[in-house]
Image (cartoon, rainbow, N blue to C red):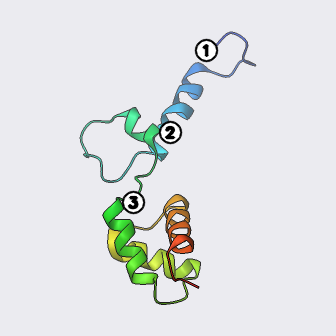
């Protein structure tokens, strides 16, 4: 068993597997299937482009927008389930939209 100094005899392979699994959990689905870049995993989920954000806001500006409506509008524009950061971005843009109650 190989251990890292200062750890309570946790095998190095288990620690490396945990690190690998953490990287893979954040790996974007849009990335190529062949190869693997940990930097893509560290970058986190993609943000909405300004054009996508504008499309979502234009879709929601004339109606009350609860979190479900925001999520559905994001799916309609991106074709993917939204992550919390995307929903917060749209909610912030809607609050700042001129003339919106």
Q: Which residue is mark 3?
A: 48
Find numbered disc 2 in the image and state the secondary structure of the residue it sits on.
helix
Using the numbered discs, state the Cα–Cα distance from disc 3 to disc 1 in whole angstroms. Answer: 46 Å
Please tell me whether mark 3 sits on a helix, a strand or a loop.
loop
The residue sitting at 50% across, 77% down in the picture is 98
Label located before the other in sequence (3 or 1)? 1
On residue 1, which mark appears? 1
CA–CA distance in space, label 2 to label 1? 21 Å
Measured from the top left, where is residue 55 in percent x and y? 34, 74
* Mark 1 surroundings within 10 Å by alpha-carbon count, few (fewer than 14), some (14 through 19), many (20 or more): few
From what the image shows, is residue 81 above or below residue 62? Answer: above
Using the image as rendered, state which of residue 88 and residue 84 is in the foreground. 88
Quick one: label 3, few (<14), some, or many (20+) residues within 10 Å? some
* Marks 2,1: beta carbons within 8 A: no
Mark 2 vs mark 1, foreground winner is 2
Can I make out residue 65 in this image?
yes
- Across and down, in percent, residue 77 comes to 33, 73
Q: Which image quarter holds the N terminus? A: top right
Can residue 79 be seen here? The reply is no
* Residue named by callout 2: 21
Q: Is residue 13 left or right of residue 42?
A: right
The number of discs equals: 3
Between disc 2 and disc 1, whose residue precedes? 1
Q: Quadrant of residue 92?
A: bottom right
- Identity of the residue drawn at 64% across and 14% down: 3
At mark 1, the secondary structure is loop
Q: Residue furthest bottom?
A: 63
Mark 3–mark 2 CB contact (< 8 Å) = no
**Residue in the foreground of this view, choosing between 37 and 78:** 78
């Amino acid at each position: 068993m190989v251990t890292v100094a200062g750890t309570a005899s946790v095998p190095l392979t288990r620690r490396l597997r945990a690190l690998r699994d953490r990287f893979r959990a954040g790996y974007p689905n849009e990335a190529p299937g062949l190869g693997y870049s940990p930097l893509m995993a560290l970058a986190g989920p993609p943000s909405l482009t300004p054009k996508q954000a504008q499309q979502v806001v234009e879709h929601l500006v004339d109606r009350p927008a609860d979190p479900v409506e925001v999520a559905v509008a994001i799916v309609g524009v991106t074709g993917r389930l939204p992550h919390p950061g995307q929903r917060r971005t749209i909610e912030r843009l809607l609050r700042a939209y001129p003339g919106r109650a």
